[in-house]
Amino acid sequence: MVDVAFQSNRAAAAQSGRRRVGLRNALRRKSMAAFLMTLPLILLIAILVLYPALYSLHLATLNKAMTKFVGFGNFEFLFKRDTFWLVVKQSCIFAISAVIFKALLGFIVAHFVHNVPANKQRKWRGMLLVPWVIPPAMSTLAWLWLFDPSYSAFNYTLSFFGIGPIPWTGDAMWARFSVILVNVWYGAPFFMIMYLAALKSVPDQLYEAAAIDGANWWQRIWYVTLPMMRNIIAITTLFSLIVTFANFDIVRILTAGGPLDHTHIFATWAFRVGIEGSDVPLGASVSLFMVPILAVAAIFILRDITKRGNEA
Amino acid sequence: MSRKKLSRREFVAATALSSAALITAPYVRGAYAAGKLSMGFWDHWVPGANSASTELVNEWAAKEKVEVQIDYITSQGNKNIVTIAAEAQAKSGHDIFQMPTWWPQANAELLEPVNDIMDPLIKLNGDVNGTVKYLGQAGGKWLGVPASVGSQIKGPCSRIDLMKKHANIDVQEMYPAGSEPKADNWTLDTFLKAAEACHKAGFPFGIGLGETSDSVDTAGAIFQSFGAQLVDAKGNLTVKTDAVRQALDYYKKLLAFLPPDVSAWDDASNNKWLVAGKGAMILNPPSAWAVAKRDAPQVAEQCWTHGFPAGPKGRFAPYLPFFWSIWSFSKNKEAAKSLLSHLSQPASIEKMVVASGGYDLPAYEKLTTLKVWAEQTPPKGTLYHYPNPYKHQTLSIAASPAPPKIAQQIYFQATLTKMCLRYYQGESMEKTLAWAEGECEGFMRS
């Protein structure tokens, strides 16, 4: 018995020594050090992102009084509501058209800035980034005054040309146009700066080779610039699509979803239903509706990027 | 070292003596002997109005030895209701929260009943109006104490000169300062004719048809004047009724005489309309008049706040009360009740109303004739009829008498104004009613 106990202690001591060496080795490993250094950020994300996300999932499975588990009951209820499908349609119109215009505008402006002489580029880059660096809640207030139903500065200016008054936020079509316009104004600089960085990384030799082959301006864009920017375009589009689908402040401040719910998007309608209407579970369900769709889109886009990265 | 041994008798005597000394010793209260109390109060629009509440709370705290903390929370951007939702979810936060209109009902299960202080307060200050009971009581339980701070009537604020000149209506004669209204002819028909005349003269009434509170409140009062309810008190759908059809037809006629952009109006639009001198009337508490006093005194001098026009089923005016409610998770409920009782004494209420320049309205019937409203100028008596001193109109809230949890959805989804706009924009009556019925069915989920 004693022998066994003695041997067992020896084994434990050896094991603990091995563990100490193992821990030292683990700490020496770069990946371990990296993990430990990012741990505070991981914890922060877990507390501020993961926990609320899981909590909203939990909320979405409760009844209105939050006393009973109803599974997918809230989603079943939403699928029967016309207003919900109107919100889905509008969110898609809002996000897709805003992202397309932001990308297009960003691409064009990036080319302009790229062609500005290097010593003047910094000034242009700074000025063009202004819409993106102002908090959208602030800049949207300025837009609200420009679109004001009774005192619109735009309508005042247009009146000199015999145009208007245009019901910027009072008519469904114009209100949709207005919220998309403000979103494009706010988001285009992000695309511009990303595309500018991508343009700068395209080797000049490729353009020289294309020029020798007799490629015109359009062919240089199509066969050289765009393929070289493909990954950046995919990532920015995905990122912007997610952010635009989740937009709240612009629509909330400019139209609050009106007129007749024709500018509501997921976040504004979730707020209306969940906070203003005191139906928190339904609000959580509205805001979670896009998660699986965007997640699938993200997986495909990111997989494509990884594949191209590996090919390269 | 000699040690004296304590006998059993000596031990019993010493214990009895020390116990008696402890019991009979005078209780010395520390600065905050009665604990802490935190409150989330609504941040008043009127500059300086918060200071009256702060003084009253501090006065009570000094007397009761309670450490108090007041947070004034704005309703701009709905910050107050977001905070209510957060505290309700966390079951933690302030002890007392000043809740607007629907929120005591929405959080009924999480609020401490205050019947023990409401009963004496009603005896002292007089009964409260029906809307306060509708919003503040659930199953016989008072969910909060009606707060004068922030409570308001959104009655007509007319331009004396423009109404006289273009609509041939003397609002001062109809609602004379210091005496009963002579408003028998002030009906929805007269109102429509006046709207038409002022529109023709280039000074349309500034009545919004957006999705925010001011627009919804006006629609609510007009619907109630026709007896139109979307859902009745028992929770039955009553959308497809003649009363609702009449209200929609009336609104269609009225909309033709309003500014063309009213569907995009928010709660600031009507105020701007009055202050800019563009219209002959708005439906609002006296905040617009107060701003005009500062920014456009020539407009303020011509403003007169008065009662709503009467419809076939009565004269209704939009009334939006606030409540001071105590969360059930509060750790100092007795102190909270004592404070709310102090804030609801007639002298305290008068102090707060005066500080708000007459904007705040007490819910109690004995407190609607304070001097402050009679004394406000310009012109003298402009706010005399604001608190409904002769009770010639029923104070109501849009979407009532539907069960409050359904009514709150009708209110915040702006179902009434959306119906009016749909019908005005050419949708058929039956289609509009069917849409509204579908919406209300959805609001009934539990």
Image: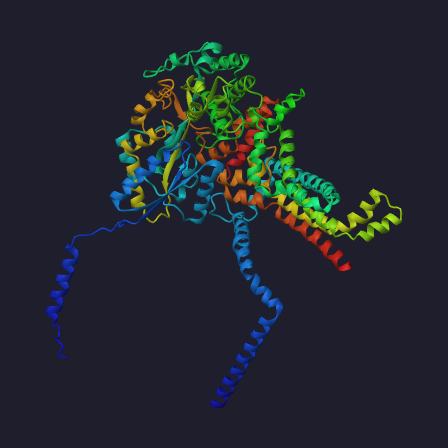
Q: Is residue B429 visible?
A: no
Whether A176 is drawn above or below B245: the answer is: below
Name the one closer to the observer, A226 or A22: A226
Name the one closer to the observer, A4 or A29: A29
For the point 56% across and 17% down, which residue is it? B256
Query: Taking A307 as reference, is A139 left or right?
Result: left
- Residue A255 location in percent, x, y? 57, 33
- Residue B38 location in percent, x, y? 36, 45
- Residue A158 location in percent, x, y? 65, 24
Q: Residue furthest front?
A: A119
Name the one closer to the observer, A184 or B418: A184
Numbered label tally = 0
- Residue B433 location in percent, x, y? 56, 26
For the point 40% across and 47% down, which residue is it? B93
Query: Taking B44 as reference, is A109 left or right?
Result: right
Q: Is residue B201 visible?
A: yes
Whether B42 is drawn above or below B168: the answer is: below
Which quarter shows the N terminus of chain B? bottom left
For the point 59% across and 36% down, which residue is it? A264
Name the one closer to the observer, A220 or B54: A220
Whether B33 is drawn above or below B138: the answer is: below
Q: Residue furthest right?
A: A213
